[in-house]
Image (cartoon, rainbow, N blue to C red):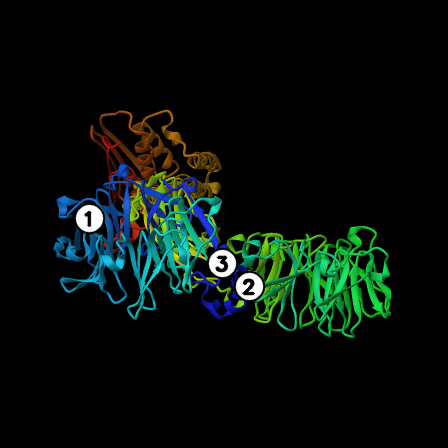
């Protein structure tokens, strides 16, 4: 009966296949579910699981005798009394509120967990008794509590103790249940009552319950009401009739502690003898592991359809996977299939490594071995002839099955049986056989070798494929790929030298487009198109480079059996990769976690015949631990993406409160993010990517890694975003925003102040530089003016004197040659003197007149020199304190006097000139006065613009003195200069 159910389910499961990912498929054997067990060795604080629930955030919560446990599919987090969050470590019950809170019933109070905070309520807060044993929230949000012997309700922050009148019918409350119509049921030691308004109506008495101690209640989708207790199960059907179930009805034990109906309508019972499932009118159970009973304490189905079973020996998860595997646990004779084939009548045939050929029947199976005439019990290949005969290749030849009868033949009429790795009838009905000695064609009773083989294993042809154009392809175990275009042509051998990625050929398949797909060992998948070979390996996204079988699902995908599992990939993607449109393949890979009992899906030596596609679209694959099948039409990604949480954020090793945005102190050296994507069905398939906005410009792939670290973040605003997804499925994300504060020298005010200070400094430097340039320019200008004055006062005045002497010479030349000679000598001396003075002026030397005497003496001597050779009468008056004056004062006053005398000689036509010098304690006064023709008033301003006058004014200004110029027509000209000595 066991195998009958299993095999019959193969043909019926397609009816419900589109929903099988969302709940456990009742048509499967327990052995075909994937069962995972967690115990203390995997991180539980203790193995007894008394309560299980799931909160809205996706976390699974467990109640144990050693505290409360949170599970994300990867790690267990335990909360205990020692942590200060629970009043007791003994957790009796759990309930997840619709609003997201978790209620925790303990032996010493009621605790609520919400938003990361625990709050405990005890008798001090109105709880009738601290020993809380059962919880249930009604549809209005009120929490019903069994606390000690009392029943109470918690609503709007207050406890209300329920009137004990219900005890008359039910006794002391034990279990609370709300049915789909929101009716509240209370089960006690003596009966069961239903709440009607504020009253309780008896529904079951002790007579109906047979004195059973009620442990659980449930109303199923057929409106049947189930009651569990220590005597088994009671079912009150919709018509009111009662049905009792105990061990005689398949229950492994009469003490039933838990009931659950999953979303597919399967009823599950947890007993002291293990888990049981209702099938029809009986319960079926999995075999107990190691012969010990599994005491089931609680049952729960999560949002993804996994069934969680809390037992005395740990936490169990039962999962319905993508692949269903058939082997010895389901009643088949072996776990070592090598080939599978469905004939034209829909009959399934399986060839095994050790038990021959098996025909799957609705009520079991039929085996064919060498006792029934099979050539050998190790079957390599099953094919079908044009007339419907089965062709079976074995290690000791091949057999033909016609109308259920087997006949055996030997290749090439060999006296010793040759192994047949593959065989087929070509388009003309001719039989071709691949054996160690080569590929043979049977012609009548004779055999003709078309392709050579042997003598070593690598030379063996092991797989055949006839192309749409009649070309025969033969893959060898390790010598390459043979091509025979027709029976009259010579075969050609392709090897790695011709572009193959490996010479070990394991599978051949030509699609309807004419592309030949080649499965190799060590070289991945190869395609032959337009005369060339192209390979795809793990570098492009394949699960493995060892490909034993290729199957086309008819939906544009190739399925590959490999030594690491089964993978599915799109032919379009393969061709896009060849065209350079993409860089890698997006493959779906399936291993042990997906229903395969072994990831070794390339069994057999030298090779197995591989899988097949049945009429209903299901794909069949031999593995080293059973025959696995899957329907490609339902192998879609779950529509429930992982729920992502930031588990922890550490700044320099210190935890951060994730409930609010943080402002991290300056100089944080390292920040670490720990996150989790809750997908309880298959957490190992969850993949992550993350991005730190404010630093990362694109998503960073983390693979399955659940921690990421950043070092030395600059100050600023950041936003960490992590996404979790299943391959090819939807994604979810979690976000955490935080600020890294700047150092004081990175703040806006400091930067602004610094900019301001630097601005002022730059402006000051600019002004300093400008002042330096101006001073330099002023010095240059002053030097130019000095040179102009010196040239005017030396060269020009000297030239004037020389001209005067030459004029006198011209007059005296005829009259008195002796006097003329004197004038000429004077002119020569004046020329030498002027040249010397010019050199001294350029070198900024002190006037020669002042080198050996003071200003009064120099002025007296120079004045007589200036008027020498003229008829001008000179009068020099020196008054005041005769002392040494500053060099600049003496030099400039001497030049002023020289300019004034020169102007008198040139322009005044004077008879006499008077120079007076008065030296006082605070100043010195110089006056030059002549009796020349003078100027009219309008001409005075014009004369003041004369270079000589300007030069005298500038010299006076340099000394900080006062310059006065006056003239009157017919009355001469007076120049007065007053220079303060104290400022010098």
Is residue 220 at all visible to an observer of this figure? Answer: yes
Label 2 – label 3 distance at C-alpha:
10 Å
Name which residue lies at 40% across and 47% down. Answer: 315
The answer to whether mark 3 and mark 1 are in CB contact below 8 A is no
Q: Mark 2 = which residue?
A: 7
Q: Mark 1 = which residue?
A: 147
Give 641 or 705, whichever is nearer the viewer: 641
Q: Could you classify mark 1 by the number of other residues whose Cα lies within 10 Å: few (under 14), some (14-19), or many (20 or more)? A: many
Q: Earlier in the sequence, mark 2 or mark 1?
A: 2
- 718 sits to left or right of 2: left
Label 2 – label 1 distance at C-alpha:
50 Å
Give 866 or 516, whichever is nearer the viewer: 516
Name which residue lies at 48% across and 44% down. Answer: 290
Label 3 – label 1 distance at C-alpha:
40 Å
Quarter of the image where the C terminus is located: top left
Q: Mark 3 = which residue?
A: 29
Q: Earlier in the sequence, mark 2 or mark 3?
A: 2
């Amino acid at each position: 009966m066991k195998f009958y159910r299993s095999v019959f389910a193969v043909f019926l499961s397609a009816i419900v296949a589109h929903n099988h990912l969302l709940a456990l498929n009742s048509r499967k054997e327990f052995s075909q579910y994937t069962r995972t067990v967690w115990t203390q060795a995997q991180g539980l604080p203790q193995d007894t699981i008394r309560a299980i629930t799931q909160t809205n955030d996706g976390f699974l919560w467990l109640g144990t005798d050693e505290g409360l446990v949170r599970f994300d599919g990867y790690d267990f987090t335990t909360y205990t009394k020692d942590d200060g969050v629970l009043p007791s470590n003994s957790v009796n019950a759990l309930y997840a509120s619709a609003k997201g809170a978790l209620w925790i019933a303990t032996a010493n109070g009621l605790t609520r967990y919400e938003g990361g905070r625990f709050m405990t309520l005890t008798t001090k807060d109105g709880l009738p008794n601290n020993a809380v044993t059962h919880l249930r929230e009604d549809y209005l949000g009120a929490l019903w509590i069994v606390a000690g012997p009392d029943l109470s309700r918690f609503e709007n922050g207050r406890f209300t103790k329920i009137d004990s009148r219900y005890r008359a019918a039910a006794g002391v409350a034990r279990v609370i249940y709300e049915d789909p119509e929101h009716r509240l049921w209370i089960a006690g030691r003596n009966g069961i009552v239903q709440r009607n308004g504020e009253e309780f109506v008896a529904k079951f008495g002790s007579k109906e319950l047979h004195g059973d101690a009620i442990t659980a209640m449930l109303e199923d989708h057929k409106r049947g009401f189930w009651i569990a207790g220590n005597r088994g199960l009671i079912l009150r059907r919709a018509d009111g009739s009662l049905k009792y179930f105990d061990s005689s009805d398949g229950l492994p034990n009469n003490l039933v502690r838990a009931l659950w109906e999953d979303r597919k309508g399967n009823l599950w019972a947890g007993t002291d003898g293990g888990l049981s499932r209702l099938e029809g009118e009986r319960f079926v159970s999995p075999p107990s592991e190691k012969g010990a009973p599994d005491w089931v304490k609680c049952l729960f189905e999560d949002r993804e359809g996994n069934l969680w079973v809390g037992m005395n020996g740990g936490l169990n998860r039962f999962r319905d996977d993508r692949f269903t595997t058939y082997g010895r646990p389901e009643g088949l004779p072996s776990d070592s299939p090598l080939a599978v084939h469905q004939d034209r009548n829909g009959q399934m045939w399986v060839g095994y490594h050790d038990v021959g050929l098996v025909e799957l029947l609705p009520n079991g199976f039929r085996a064919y071995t060498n006792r029934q005439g099979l050539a050998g019990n190790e079957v390599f290949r099953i094919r079908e002839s044009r007339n419907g005969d089965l062709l079976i290749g074995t290690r000791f030849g091949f057999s033909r099955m016609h109308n259920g009868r087997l006949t055996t033949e030997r290749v090439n009429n060999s006296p010793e049986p040759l192994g047949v790795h593959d065989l087929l009838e070509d388009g003309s009905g001719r039989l071709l056989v691949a054996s160690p000695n080569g590929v043979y064609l049977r012609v009548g009773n004779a055999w003709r070798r078309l392709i050579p083989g042997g003598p070593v294993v690598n030379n063996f042809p092991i797989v055949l494929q006839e192309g749409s154009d009649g070309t025969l392809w033969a893959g060898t175990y390790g010598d390459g790929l043979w091509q025979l275009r027709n029976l009259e042509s010579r075969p050609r051998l392709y090897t790695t030298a011709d572009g193959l990625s490996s010479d070990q050929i394991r599978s051949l398949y030509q699609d309807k487009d004419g592309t030949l797909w080649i499965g190799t060992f060590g070289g991945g998948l190869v395609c032959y198109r337009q005369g060339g070979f192209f390979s795809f390996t793990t570098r492009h996204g394949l699960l493995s480079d060892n490909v034993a079988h290729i199957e086309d699902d008819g939906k544009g995908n190739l399925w590959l059996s490999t030594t690491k599992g089964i993978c599915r990939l799109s032919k379009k993607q393969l061709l896009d990769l060849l065209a350079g449109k993409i860089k890698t393949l997006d493959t779906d890979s399936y291993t042990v976690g997906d229903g395969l009992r072994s990831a070794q899906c390339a069994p057999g030596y030298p090779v197995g015949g591989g899988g097949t596609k049945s009429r209903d679209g299901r794909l069949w694959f031999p593995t080293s631990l059973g025959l696995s099948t899957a329907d490609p039409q339902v192998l879609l990604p779950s529509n429930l993406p992982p729920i992502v949480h930031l588990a922890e954020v550490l700044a320099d090793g210190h935890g951060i409160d994730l409930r609010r945005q943080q402002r991290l102190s300056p100089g944080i050296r390292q920040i670490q993010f720990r996150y989790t994507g809750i997908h309880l069905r298959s957490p190992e398939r969850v993949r992550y990517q993350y991005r730190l906005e404010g630093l990362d410009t694109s998503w960073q792939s983390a693979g399955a890694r659940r921690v990421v670290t950043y070092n030395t973040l600059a100050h600023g605003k950041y936003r960490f975003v992590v996404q979790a997804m299943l391959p090819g499925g939807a994604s979810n994300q979690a976000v955490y925003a935080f600020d890294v504060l700047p150092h004081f020298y990175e703040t806006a005010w400091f930067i602004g102040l610094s900019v301001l200070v630097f601005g002022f400094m730059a402006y000051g430097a600019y002004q300093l530089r400008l002042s330096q340039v101006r001073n330099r320019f002023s010095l240059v200008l002053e030097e130019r003016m000095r040179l102009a004055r010196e040239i005017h006062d030396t060269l020009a005045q000297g030239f004037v004197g020389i001209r005067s002497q030459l004029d006198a010479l011209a007059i005296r030349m005829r009259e008195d040659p002796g006097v003329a000679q004197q004038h000429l000598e004077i002119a020569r001396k004046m020329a030498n003197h002027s040249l010397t003075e010019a050199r001294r002026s350029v070198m900024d030397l002190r006037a020669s007149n002042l080198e050996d005497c003071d200003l009064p003496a120099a002025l007296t001597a120079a004045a007589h020199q200036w008027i020498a050779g003229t008829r001008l009468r000179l009068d020099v008056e020196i008054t005041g304190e005769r002392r040494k004056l500053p060099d600049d004062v003496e030099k400039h006053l001497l030049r002023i006097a020289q300019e004034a005398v020169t102007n008198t000689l040139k322009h005044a036509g004077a008879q006499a000139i008077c120079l007076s010098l008065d030296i006082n304690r605070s100043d010195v006064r110089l006056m030059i006065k002549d009796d020349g023709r003078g100027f009219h008033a309008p001409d005075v301003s014009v004369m003041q613009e004369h270079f000589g006058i300007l030069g005298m004014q500038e010299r006076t200004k340099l000394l900080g003195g006062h310059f006065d110029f006056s003239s009157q027509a017919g009355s001469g000209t007076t120049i007065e200069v007053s220079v303060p000595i104290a400022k010098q």
